[in-house]
Image (tube, rainbow, N blue to C red):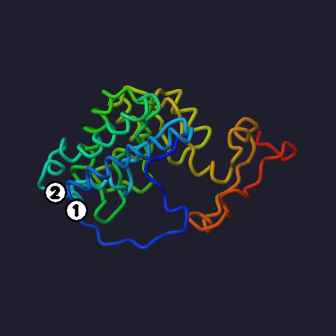
Amino acid sequence: MFISTEWENDCCGRKPTVTPRPLTKQEIQTTVADFGRAARNASAASFDGVQILAIYLYLTSQFLNATTNRRKDEYGGSLENRSRFLFEVLETVLNEVDAKRVGVKISPMHEGGAFAANDETLPITEYAIGKLNAYNLSHLLLVGNPTDFSGTPLEKLAGDGMFRHFRPVYKGTLIVNVNMNRERGNRLIAEGLADLIAFGRPYIANPDLVHRFAAGAPLAEVDWETVYASGPGGYSDYPIYQASQPTII
């Protein structure tokens, strides 16, 4: 299994946000070192590898984003500077874990507010993904559009557009996800737009997803009331498919 070097709010439910402030350079150095320690701990705990999250609202994305990154030092401004934190983290992690056991999850995103797509969103992502080619990583996990891209600078990346755009940019193993089912996943691989498919939401409600796909069995639906909630409900109580259940022909 892989473990991400950042985590979701899955221990105690959703938490209120706090007013952000710029990190000092010392805090940046400490944070980069924390990523390395997290990777070392994951390796010691016998995880197969680690994945660095450079997406959504996570800290790395805040450095990449021209709206949230207002720094005037070597971590802000140009594409190179805004991606500096990502590559310092990556190189620190690679000091602890072999590159063939390290992946990066990234995509240009449109989340709204300060994280809404702007004219710099696609260029910074192209720059970062192109530079990742030099590291011979386990994989790049490219996320499709989880929100409506209509009327944004990312409009052309809707649907399969994300994968068509970045497949020529990244030369290594490309994993794609968001709104995936068995049929779409097989098609994207057949078309050469992906090497592997990541299934997120279907796996939440279907711990036996592989067997259900193989049997053409119906999939259980996610109980959204339990997502990011406290306790085991919605995490370990989804039923396993029984062969006696009807299959899809």
Quarter the N terminus occupies: top right
Residue in front for this viewpoint, 50 or 25 = 25
User: Residue at left 31%, top 47%?
Assistant: 32
User: Residue at left 34%, top 72%?
Assistant: 18
Question: Which element is circle 1 on?
Answer: loop
Question: Along the horizontal axis of the image, is 23 left or right of 96?
Answer: left
Residue in front for this viewpoint, 77 or 144 = 77
Image quarter of residue 171: top left
* Marking on residue 71: 2
Q: Position of residue 215 (x, y in %)?
A: 76, 37
The correct choice, above or below, for 114 with respect to 46 in the image is below
* Marking on residue 165: none
Question: Quick one: which residue is furthest to the left in this view?
Answer: 72
List the residue tagged with mark 1: 22
Q: Position of residue 35 (x, y in %)?
A: 38, 47
The correct choice, above or below, for 136 with respect to 66 in the image is above
User: Residue at left 21%, top 57%?
Assistant: 69
Q: Position of residue 75 (x, y in %)?
A: 18, 49
Q: Amino acid at mark 2?
A: Arg
Q: Amino acid at mark 1?
A: Pro
Few, some or many residues within 10 Å of mark 2 (<14, 14–19, 20+): some
Residue in front for this viewpoint, 64 or 247 = 64
Quarter the C terminus occupies: top right
Distance between the Cα atoms at labels 2 and 1? 8 Å
Question: Which element is circle 2 on?
Answer: loop
Question: Along the horizontal axis of the image, is 125 left or right of 100?
Answer: left
- Check if mark 2's residue and mark 1's residue have beta carbons within 8 Å: yes
Residue in front for this viewpoint, 184 or 134 = 134
Q: Please tell me which of labels 2 and 1 falls first in the chain.
A: 1
